[in-house]
Image: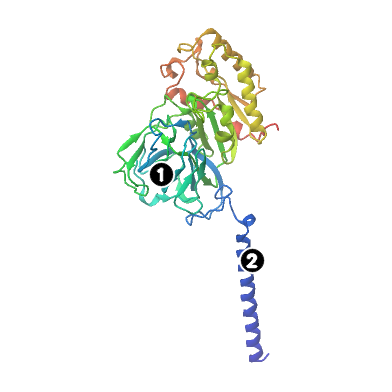
Amino acid sequence: MTRRHACALLAAFTALIIAVSAGIYLVARQASARPEARDTSLSGGRVPHNPAAPASTGTWVGSWAAAPSGAEPGTELTGIAGRSVRNIVHTSAGGSAARVTLSNHYGQLPLRITSASVGVAAQDNAAEAVPDTLRPLTFSGAPAVTVPPGGQVVSDAVALRVHADSDLLVTTYSPTPSGPVTYHRHARQISYVATGDHVLDPRALAYTEPTPHWRYVTAVDVLSKDSRGTVVVIGDSLTDGITSTTGQDARWTDVLAERLDFRHGVANAGISGNQLLTDGLGRPADSPSGLNRFERDALSRPNTKAVVVVLGINDILRDPDGTPDPAAVTAGLRSLVSRAHARGVPVVGATLMPFEGHAGYDAVRESARQAVNTEIRRGEIFDAVLDLDAALRDPYAPHRLAGHLDSGDHLHLNDAGYRRMAQRFDTSVLSRGTTATL
């Protein structure tokens, strides 16, 4: 072969490589432009626009949640205009990225959020962030978002190393009045408020106003390669942890996450005072019934592997005629299970705990509680039973809570009682490979 022929052959080969490379690039670019070909796993079905969105793969799980419980009194006209709200939330599962859900469920005006962020707390129960972890949140690529009345938004994914069993800071700023603030009343966690826009300020100096509520934020999901999915617990004040120690993450769901070795995300959907069958007051209702909020607060969580139901005691306590119908309660529980099974999600149900000594106790209500528990224990309502009645009652006075677990009001628990709740949960129900009957 002559040198000229060799050079011609080399040139042809080089041209072929360039052409093939260009073809691959164009095909890849065209594929990325087609919605059906884009990887939307990082944004819950939406294309992530945030340039800080992670490139790694994994599964989205719910690491923290708080059900919207009402409109915050005193915010009807101005909302929290001109102030930064720094919510402190405690994770269950960890991951390599995070996304945040913000809610205007109880708002009557559009909620304009001009900046928001998520970061890792520098220490427990404090508003200071580890500086290099504070990430601005975007929404479809924009730093600002307007949440319509009754609506919610999910942020784009941001790359952030989220550790299991740790505190995160979710901060929002709204410059304009937005009307009633959507909040979770009994956070059992102190968060903080600052005057002005301090969303991206890692320091705590401006956050001088403590608050016992969570505002706007209702969920933090993480992208995890190791998590086995989300366990959602829907319940009343016993799940909300109303009498647990503030700032100690002593709710029974926190202990449950620990027992699961933080390999599952645990989403707490407890609302104090919540009933299974009856909505609270207002429009939309404060504390909507378990039946009405089951889709929103339980079935819509990412990668839900099981739902735990701890509801029914308030339907007995708060029956307006003082004659609660146990058949109505068990029918409501069966309805929840049927709806979960339609999604292929198994349900663990809890027996109703004793409350003799509480102001609402009487023989009629006790009889209704026993009737509900009898039906639950038959094993024909739930896929598995969490027998909290047996775990928490006084063995010598079985209509009462055990004294060392009682918060003092004979209805709610102290930290030891909430820990006992979690200890009684049979974690093997999540690994048996049992599927719900469809």
Element at label 2: helix
Residue drawn at x 54%, y 42% as measured from the top left: 61
- From the image, state whether disc 2 or disc 1 is nearer to you: 1
Which residue does the numbered mark 1 point to in the structure image?
A: 172
Marker disc for residue 68: none
User: Tag on residue 27?
Assistant: 2
In the rendered image, residue 122, in percent from the top left (x then y), is placed at 36, 44
Identify the residue shown where x is 61% and y is 35%.
431
Amino acid bearing label 2: Val
Left or right of residue 354, residue 169 in this image: left
* Secondary structure of residue under mark 1: strand
Q: Is residue 307 above or below residue 117?
A: above
Residue at the extreme top = 363
Dividing the picture into quarters, in which one does residue 163 lie?
Answer: top left
Q: Residue 191: horizontal and vertical position, in percent?
A: 37, 37
Q: Specify the amino acid type for callout 1.
A: Thr
| Gap in angstroms between the C-alphas marked 2 and 1 | 41 Å
Q: Name the colour scheme.
A: rainbow
Quick check: can you spot residue 413?
Answer: yes
Q: In the image shown, does 323 or 240 lie closer to the viewer? A: 323
The one nearer the camera, 138 or 380, is 138
In the picture, measured across the screen, residue 37 lies left or right of residue 198, that is right
Q: Position of residue 272 (x, y in %)?
A: 47, 25
| Image quarter in which the C terminus is found | top right
